[in-house]
Image (cartoon, coloured by chain):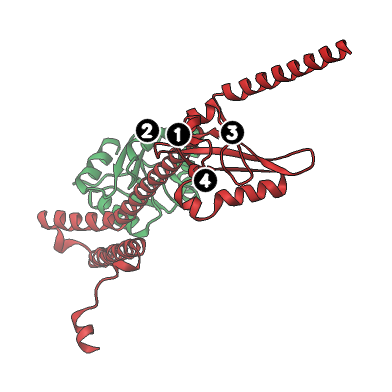
Chain colours: A red, B green
Amino acid sequence: MASDTTHRATLREQLQASEKRFRLLVESVRDYAIFMLDPEGRIVSWNLGAERIKGYRADEIVGEHFSRFYPPEDVAAGKPARGLEVAEREGRVEDEGWRVRKDGSRFWANVVITALRDAGGRLVGFAKVTRDLTERKRAEEDRLRLAREQAARAEAEAAVRARDEFLSIAAHELKTPLTPLQLQVQLLVHSLRKGELTTLPPERLGAMLESAERQSKRFASLIEKLLDLSRIAAGPRSRPPPHPEEVAGS
Amino acid sequence: LTPHAGQGVLVVEDDPDIQQVLRFALEMAGYPVTTADNGVEALRQLKAATPPCLILLDLMMPVMDGWQFRAAQQQDPALAAIPVVVISADGRTPQKAVSIGAAGYLTKPVDFDRLVEVVQRYC
């Protein structure tokens, strides 16, 4: 009998020691907010991680409803209650979103809510584990912003390259009629200065003047095309205003 | 300007108006002129007749362009020595002239005095 009592006392001591170790473990974790809610969502336990992440001491927060960790818009949308409903129905629910610290600042949280049931299956509350992922979120946002900026820069550079290429082609096209035009005029001036203009064979003079006329028309048409292109590129808003006569006539 | 007997200038240019005015200008300066619309025609003429003192070569042409013509010309020992002056509207004409081993270059639009000056060096 004596040994049985001793044995039971030893078991109780072992159990207490185990509980103490477990509580110490949970309470000491700094990187995770680990706390318990009663079935209605009121906070019943608190750890060091929760204090560090959310800013409340245990004596300030135990007994309060956990919805105070959510931004007002999420509370208005019924998010905290829905989280508990899902956890109760499915056993657990995981969520990522903005949460509010005691000082009102927001942090990006990964939250897991697990329903806790006794041996009879009765809901006794919820375990809530929250991680602060703000840094990771910021890094991700920075990376996305950087990628967007790089894409925008690449696009701008491509536009500049396309413009330069276009200008180079346009310049080449414009020089094509200008080459014969300039040379024809120079030849005529040269002949005139040497007193040879009248001795030029008429068919040659005719061919030069006809070609000069053709080139100036070609030049004018190229300029028109260039203007059309710039109007197309600028879009429909840049359509010139109607001529006063058109307005008057309508 | 005095007439130049014998060897003339070969103008290789696909634009008929540029071809015509270069012919007029060179003839006015006293040089006999033959013309070709592309590299293939130019090679045919070079093989058939007395070689010219100078080839004025456009680069962008259909059928056979200036680069292809120049490569073929350099491979033919009978034609390789004929000097070539590139004539182009391209902004990188000087570099392109160097890259094909041309004797010189003229940029479009071509100035009459400069044209005569360049041709005089070789003819």
Q: Position of residue B75 (x, y in %)?
A: 51, 34
Question: What residue sits right under mark 1 in the picture?
Answer: B80
Q: Nearer the viewer, mark 1 or mark 2?
A: 2
Identify whether A90 is placed above or below A105: below
Question: What residue sits right under mark 3 in the picture?
Answer: A35
Kind of residue at badge 4: Ser
Question: What residue sits right under mark 2 in the picture?
Answer: B98
Q: Is residue A38 visible?
A: yes
Q: What secondary structure is marked by label 3?
A: strand
Q: Nearer the viewer, residue B6 or A128?
A: A128
Kind of residue at badge 2: Val
Kind of residue at badge 1: Ala
**Is residue A15 rendered to the left or right of residue A227?**
right
Q: Nearer the viewer, residue A162 or A5?
A: A5
Farthest residue in the front direction?
A1
Q: What secondary structure is marked by label 1?
A: loop
Q: Nearer the viewer, mark 2 or mark 3?
A: 3
Q: What secondary structure is marked by label 2?
A: helix
Question: What residue sits right under mark 4 in the picture?
Answer: A67
Kind of residue at badge 3: Phe
Q: Nearer the viewer, mark 2 or mark 4?
A: 4
Q: State the separation of the CA atoms marked 1 and 4.
A: 90 Å
Whether labels 1 and 2 belong to a single chain: the reply is: yes
Going from N to C along the chain, the mark reached first, 1 or 2, is: 1
The chain letter under disc 1 is B
Q: Report crowding for label 1: few under 14, some 14 to 19, many 20 or more residues within 10 A (C-alpha).
A: some
Numbered label tally: 4
